[in-house]
Image (cartoon, rainbow, N blue to C red):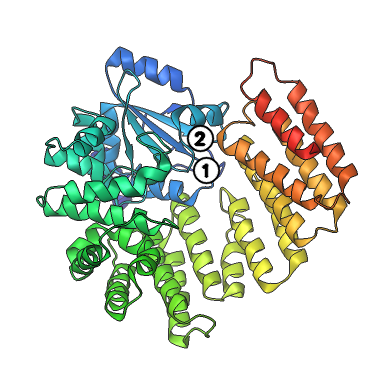
Amino acid sequence: MKRTLLAMALALAGLMPLAHADVSDGHALPPGISWQQGDVPAAFARAKAENKPVFLYWGAVWCPPCNQVKSTIFNRPDFIAATRQFVPVYLDGDSENAQQLGEKFKVRGYPTMILFRPDGAEITRLPGEVDPERYLRTLQLGLTAVKPVKALLTDALAGNTLAAADWQLLADYAWDVDRGQLLPEQDVPATLAQLAERVPAEPAAVATRLQLKALAALAGEKAPPTFDKRQARGRLLRVLADDKLSRANADVVIYAASDALKLLGDDAALRQAFDAQLKKLEADSTLSWSDRLGAASTLLSLYKQQHPKQPLPAGLVADVKAKATEADKASANPYQRQAVITAAGELLSDAGLLDESDTLLKGELKTSHAPYYHMLILASNAKERGDKAAALDWYQKAYQASEGQATRLQWGASYVSNAVELAPQDAGRIELAASEVFADAGKSGSAFYERSRRSLEKVAGRLKTWNQDGKHADAVGRLAGQLNGVCEKLSAEDAQKPVCDGLVKELKS
């Protein structure tokens, strides 16, 4: 009893993270914050009246990184205290008109977090993959910024002098979810490379961060622009030789390692430096379990990259099993488990431990607030075994269990796509699955915006491929007629109508 009272007192005093709400329904909001849920226009009206910025969170209940943010950032007393400085808006991707708003604000990937001025001008996009301390520092910089990031980028490229805090905002901007807000997506790597050469040498931490972000962006390109590989390799080696710098930039070290090695040349010195730091990050208790599992996954990926088609060493396999077990035992609250168990299940699968992955994921199905996400990994495991029937069964179960407008369309598109791939002869299954997806589209008010639009485009594309020899013309014709019925209910002024009509035309072509 004394411990309970003490814990409550500390929480109320803001000295420890608040307990998580019961999220068994999948849509509970992180507690302690006065979220404005879904109604974005009302949030901006309130912000204007109170002269406060708007903090927009865009996510989904099933999304592992979203649950990671909820379990490591939104529950922190310092973040909760910071929310008094702005109007926090919680926009679930499945809420009414969420996908339409997503298109308006140029947000797609979950999670995306944006800070706006009271008048609606965007200040910055916050990175969701970094540790809480960096996130909160970036948030505070955004709240006190004189200029939005877009203006800072223009100044930096023009050679104008920027304050250290301005360079920090550019370095920690969420470039991976910019979606053309600052510049065309294809120009991001080259622009980051320019900024990496223009950033002042001091503060060194800011320069290093921006240079690493530039390298990560270049490494993710199929045909990166010309840059000084020798200089980039030297900078990277200096970071990997420094434990403090590597920890401060753990997100880049963990998640860009494989691409960076392919880009810069897979030499022994660079590989050994990555291996050494990844092992330290994997064991770093100050990192979230999702990131520690990410480090383990990258170590596994680098080994497989260097030793293709060779059996994994017994010691490496044992390490993977031990790390997954440890992460499972250490993860308590539902938000954390949604992020960690999926990562652990995928890690086990990547190590060839499909049975162990299945056991872990199946054990979570009754308690997870989004079991349909785990079912997709179970389907992938069955697919890896070559068990097409079991894989399709899991894809179907995942779709049937999924909830929410956009989520059902996304999971339905996955089911249709895999049915076409794994059982193209099963015309009845494919037609029924696609018909259910189009029925879901007819129930949604924003089925032809953003993520939902892309899901329906995927279904139409897969059906067209399935019918490329004309053998399934009757089934596809019926489906085109069903979708056309959805289109006919849209008014001529609705921006969704030409999108819908275009999909019908594609099916009929």
Q: CA distance from mark 2 to mark 1?
A: 8 Å
Tell me what residue is drawn at x 63 percent, y 44 percent: 410
Horizontal side of 136 relative to 490 (left or right) equals left
Residue 330 percent coordinates (x, y) = 40, 64
Task: Identify the disc placed on residue 92.
Answer: 2
Residue 22 position (above or below residue 427): above
At label 2, which amino acid type do we have?
Answer: Asp
Image quarter where the C terminus lies is: top right
Instruction: Specify the amino acid type for callout 1.
Output: Val
Q: Please name the residue that numbered disc 1 is placed on.
A: 61
| CB atoms of marks 2 and 1 within 8 Å | yes
Q: Position of residue 271 (x, y in %)?
A: 32, 76
Please rate how many residues cluster around mark 1, counting C-alpha atoms within 10 Å: few if below 14, some from 14 to 19, many from 20: many
Q: Residue furthest left?
A: 202
Please tell me how crowded label 2 is: few (under 14), some (14-19), or many (20+) other residues with Cα within 10 Å: many
Q: Residue 38 or 219: which is nearer the viewer?
A: 219
> Looking at the image, can residue 408 be seen?
no
Is residue 487 in sight in this rendering? yes
Residue at horizontal 23%, vertical 40%?
Answer: 169
Q: Secondary structure at mark 1?
A: loop
Q: Would residue 67 appear left or right of 142 to someone viewing this image?
A: right
